[in-house]
Image: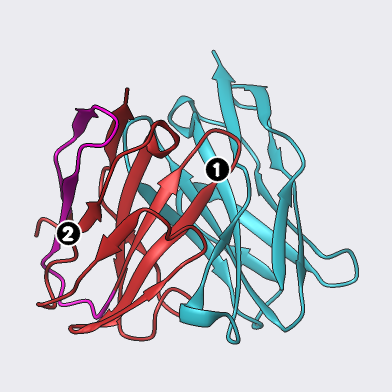
Amino acid sequence: AQSVTQLDSHVSVSEGTPVLLRCNYSSSYSPSLFWYVQHPNKGLQLLLKYTSAATLVKGINGFEAEFKKSETSFHLTKPSAHMSDAAEYFCVVSTIKAAGNKLTFGGGTRVLVKP
Amino acid sequence: NAGVTQTPKFQVLKTGQSMTLQCAQDMNHEYMSWYRQDPGMGLRLIHYSVGAGITDQGEVPNGYNVSRSTTEDFPLRLLSAAPSQTSVYFCASSQRQGPYNSPLHFGNGTRLTVT
């Protein structure tokens, strides 16, 4: 079984300040972990993924995430928020054992960036 | 390169009506899937396909049918619409290995309202 919990449904930051989106997961097997971003009225786009290589993963648009097995966490960060980062972000888990490579999505974190 | 194309963008149905949501991709992806997105629940997998002629159920398949006669197309049929099927529907595809190993490419979604 696998599950994902995104600890904040909404995050508000000022432009130029750091962004932290928190994600905890559970998985019976070694997981693959992803962050996807959804801009208004658009489909989701992959930001980054972790698949048991380096624990610090760099993605697009300056985002990065750190896999911490002891804490079962995969938090997403960005040093300096930009107005274009306003979107909804989804933490996602999968395992090689999941039927159909099933992805399990968290409930999402909506990011508001204030000028 | 159009990617994943979904039609229609919006649809309103009355309870009991049937309809088909269309999905086409031009990336020669073998894996295709349908998700529904509801507030606070992330995305949930309805049905998926690992190649032409092969389909399987996801976690919320009741009330929906799919078929995969070609690599490019993966339509989703609502047999008898119910208000509980009011949602935003996303079609997504990925390369042969499926979303565990290769990123999902999403369409822009179909917003369905059932009255």
Using the image as rendered, state which of residue A90 and residue B77 is in the foreground.
B77
Asked if residue A75 lies left or right of residue B109, the reply is: right
Residue B17 is left or right of residue A110, and the answer is left
Residue A52 falls in which quadrant of the image? Answer: bottom right
Return the x and y of residue A17 as percentages of the image width and height: 67, 28
Residue under label 1: A89
Residue B52, percent across and down?
Answer: 18, 83
Query: Which one is in front, B83 or B27?
Result: B83
Colour of chain B in the image: red
Secondary structure at badge 2 equals loop
Q: In the image shown, does A80 or B41 lie closer to the viewer?
A: B41
Residue at image location 73% in from the left, 35% down from the top: A8
How far apart are the alpha carbons under marks 1 and 2? 21 Å
Q: Where is mark 2, residue-wise?
A: B3
The residue marked by circle 1 belongs to what chain?
Answer: A
- Image spot of residue B65 (x, y percent): 28, 62
